[in-house]
Image: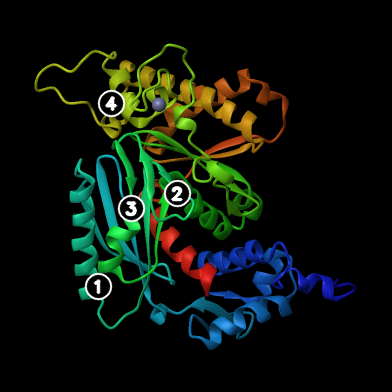
Amino acid sequence: MDSGPAVQSALLRKGDLNFAAKRSMLLKLIRAAQPITRTAIAERLKIDKSTVTENVKPLIDRGILREDVIESESGRPRVLSFAASAGYFIGVNLGVRHSQIGVTNLVGEVSDEDEFETPKDFRRALQLVDERIKSIRLAHSGEQLRGVGVSVPGMADASRRELVYAPNLNWRGVAIAEHLQKSAEAPIVIENDSTAAAMFESRVKIGESRESSASNFILVRSGTGIGVGMVIGGEVYRGTGAGRGIAGEFGHMTIVAGGKSCVCGNRGCWEQYASAAATASLYLGDRPLRPGQTLPRFVEIVAKAENGEVRSRRTLERIGDYLGIGIANVIMGTGVPRVIISGRLVFGWKFIAGPLNDAIRRSIINNIEGWSVEPGSPSGSALGGALEVAVEEYLNTV
Ligand SMILES: [Zn+2]
C-alpha cells in the first residue's frame, strides 16, 4: 500500500479503484477547458502536478495531446490541448422521428452535420446510416476514424453493441454495431440517448468549473418519450447484472393508475404526461386528430405561450407539474438531488420551471436541502450526446 507523500499521486495510478474515473475526469477536463495548463488541471481536480504529468505524457508522446507555449500577461505558460490530427469520430443519434449524424475531433470541432427522417423499418434506417458513414469516410480519407457512437431511444445491451428495445420505434433486438461494422471499420458503441446526453452534460459542467455538479446528477431527457441518465461519481450508471442497460427507464414508471395507454403496453406512464410529445396532445385536449390535422410541434406551443395565449401557457404549466411529480419520484429512488433537464422541453423552460419546482416542493424531497433542477443544453440530447459516446469510448482505451 502507498503511504506518506506518495498517497496523493497514487490517486491516478493503475490498480487504484478510482483510477479509471479520475483519469477520465482529467481527460474530460482537458477537452472541456482546452487549452489548459497542468497547474490549472491539478488545482481543479485537487491532485498534484506530477500526477497530471504522469498521465498526460504518454498521450503527448503518441500525438493525441499537444503542449504549446502561449503568450499571456502572466508570462509564457505551457498549455495542453488535444491534437486535431489525432483522428475523427462519427456520432449518430437515432431519434424516434428524426435522426442526426455528424463528425467531431478531439478539439471539439463539429462538422458534416446531417439530419434525416427516421424510417419505421430498422433495416432501412441502418441502411441510411451506412450510406452516410461511407460518404463521411470518403470525405475524410487520409484521416483515421477512431470510433462511432450511436445513441438510441431505448435500452442498449450490456456489451453496448445491440439495441434491446426502443418502445417508441417498436424495434427489438437490433444488432446495430454488427450492421454498421463493415462500413465503419472502427469501434462502434451503442448507448441509451439519455445516458449519452448525461455524458455530454457532465463534460459541459466540468468546463464551467462545476466539478461537484458534474460528478453526481440525474439527467431527464424529454422529447418523444422520457429517459433518465445517471452520473454517479463522475461515471454514468447503467444498472447491474441482468438490469445492466435498463437503469433510467423512468419514462415508463406509472404516475397515473389506469391512465393513458402507452406504447410499452402499460397505462399511465410518466412519458404520456410529461414529454414534449405529450404536450401536443394535452394542448389539443387529448382529442383524436381531425382528418388532415397534424399535432402542433413543441416549439410552436412555446411560441404561442410567448405570445400570451392562455391555453398553451396552461398546457406547459401542466407539463411542468407532471414533470415535477416524476422528478420527485426519481430523486426519492436514487438519492441524487441534482437534476438537469435535456431535450426539446428546455425551450419552454420559463413556463415549465415554476409548476415543476412547486410539484417537487409538495413531495418529501422538500425536506432535504440543496435539491435543484436546471435546464441543460438542447444539443446534448441529439448529436452532441452521440459524439460524446464515441469520443469517451476512445479516450477510455488510449
Ligand atoms: Zn410506458
Asked where in the image residue 302 lies, by quadrant, the reply is top left
Identify the disc placed on residue 175. 3
Q: Residue under label 1, please give it.
A: 137
Asked where in the image residue 370 lies, by quadrant, the reply is top right
Q: Nearer the viewer, mark 3 or mark 4?
A: 3
User: The disc labelled 4 sits on which kind of residue?
Assistant: Lys
Q: Earlier in the sequence, mark 4 or mark 1?
A: 1
User: The disc labelled 1 sits on which kind of residue?
Assistant: Arg
Q: Residue under label 4, please give it.
A: 304
In the displayed structure, would residue 110 be above or below residue 200? below
Q: Are marks 2 and 3 in contact (CB under 8 Å)?
A: no
In which quadrant will I find the N terminus?
A: bottom right
Q: Nearer the viewer, mark 4 or mark 1?
A: 1
Residue drawn at point x = 63 percent, y = 47 percent: 216
The Cα–Cα distance between marks 2 and 3, rounded to whole angstroms, is 10 Å
The Cα–Cα distance between marks 2 and 1, rounded to whole angstroms, is 27 Å
Asked where in the image residue 23 lies, by quadrant, the reply is bottom right
The Cα–Cα distance between marks 2 and 4, rounded to whole angstroms, is 41 Å
Q: Count how many numbered circles sit on residues in the image.
A: 4
The Cα–Cα distance between marks 3 and 4, rounded to whole angstroms, is 42 Å
In the displayed structure, would residue 347 be above or below residue 68? above
Q: Classify the position of ligand 1 by quadrant: top left, top right, bottom left or bottom right.
A: top left
User: The disc labelled 3 sits on which kind of residue?
Assistant: Ala
Q: Nearer the viewer, residue 8 or 67?
A: 8
**Residue 36, how many percent across, how many down?**
57, 73
The Cα–Cα distance between marks 4 and 1, rounded to whole angstroms, is 43 Å
Q: Earlier in the sequence, mark 2 or mark 3?
A: 2
* SS state under label 2: loop
Q: Nearer the viewer, residue 336 or 246?
A: 246
Identify the disc placed on residue 157. 2
The Cα–Cα distance between marks 3 and 1, rounded to whole angstroms, is 22 Å
